Image (tube, rainbow, N blue to C red):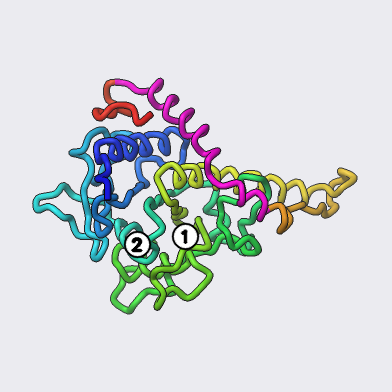
Amino acid sequence: MAVANLTQLLSILITANHVLHYRGIFDAYGHISVRNPNNASTFFLSRDLAPALVSSPHDIVEYRIDDASAVFPNAPAGVTERFIHSEVLKRYPAVNSVIHSHARAVIPYGITKVPLLPVTQSGVVLGSKLCESAPVFEIADYFLPWDAHVLLVRNARFGAALASLFSSNDTRTNTGASPTNNVVLMRGHGMAVVGQDIVTAVFRAISTPNVADIQRDALILAALGGTDGQPGRSGRIRYLTEQEKRDIAAQGTSHHRRGWELWVREVEAAATKDLYRNCLGSPL
C-alpha cells in the first residue's frame, strides 16, 4: 500500500479551517478532523486554537480514535469536543473527515419541530436517507445524574450517542455500517457533518446552512402569502421529489472540486501576516 503524503494532507486540513472560517461556518470555535491515511486508528485535529489561526503542523495534534487521547506526550491542549470526531471515525470506517460547527442558520431546526429537509439541489448533502430530515441530537437524553447539564460533547458516551444518529440503522452492533445521514443537528449547539474526505465534508458543511436559510425563507413566505401572494394565506413549499433526490445524489461528488478551488483561492487572497497563514503552502 502506498504511503500517503501527510504534508499535503495537513496542508489541506489547515486550509479547510480557513475556508470554513471565511465562509462563516466557523467563528472562533468549530473544528475539522481527518483520519490518518497511514494509520486508520488515529486522526488529526487542530489544537485548542481559533480555526483562522491554524497555520502549521505545530497546530495539529494526532489523536487515537479509540479514546481520543493524544498519540504523543506533551501534545498541546486539545479541543474539548474531540470525542465527536473519535466516535464518528470509530463507528464509520468509510468516514475520513468530521466537522463540528455552530453555524447559526441550522440552530433553529434543532430547537423546534421544523425538520430540515432538501429544498434545493444542494440539499442532498443532508444524506442518502432521502425521505427523512436531518436528525437532531438531544444530549439531555444521555445525561447521567452526575453530569453537568451543558451541551458540549465532552466524553465518549456523548460522542457515541451522537455518532449513532448518522445512521438510520442500528449501528451499535454493526460499527462497519456506512452513514445514511451526512448531517446531524445538535440541539441548541449547531451541527456535525461527515465526509469521505476533507473536500466533501467542507462542501457539505458550507451547503447545509444555505439549505437551512432557503427553507426558512420559504417557510416565512408560505406563512405570509399563498400562491396568489395574498397575506395570511398558507402557501405550499415544493420540496425535492424522491426521484429528484435520488438522481441528484447519483451525480456523485466530483463537482465539489470547483467550489473547493474557489474557496481556497478566497482565503489565499484574504491572507495576511496573522490570518489564514499556511506554512505548508497551497493545497491546490
Q: Give the residue type at disc 2.
A: Val
Which quarter of the picture shows residue 192? bottom left
Give the label on residue 196, or none.
Answer: none
Q: Is residue 100 left or right of residue 36?
A: right
Total tally of numbered discs in the picture: 2
Circle 1 sits in a helix, a strand or a loop, which is it?
strand
Residue type at mark 1? Met
- Tell me where residue 179 appears, x and y as whole percent: 48, 63
- Given residues 132 and 257, the one toward you in this image is 257
Q: Residue at x 22, y 59 (%)?
A: 64
Residue 68 inside the magenta-drawn segment = no
Nearer-the-camera pick, 193 or 258: 258
Badge 2 local density, few (<14 within 10 Å), some, or many (20+)? some
Residue 102 lies, in percent from the top left, at 44, 49
Q: What x and y, as percent, mark residue 223? A: 77, 52
Task: Tell me whether the residue at label 2 lies in contact with that at label 1, contact meaning CB atoms closer than 8 angstroms.
Answer: yes
Residue linked to disc 2:
153
Q: Residue at x 28, y 76 (%)?
A: 146
Which residue is painted at 59% across and 63% down in the image? 129
Res. 40 image quadrant: bottom left
Residue on which disc 1 sits: 186
Q: Quadrant of the C terminus?
A: top left
- 107, 21: nearer the viewer: 21
Report which quarter residue 94 is drawn in. Answer: bottom left
Give the mark nearer the N terminus: 2 vs 1: 2
Q: Which residues are magenta?
A: 245-272
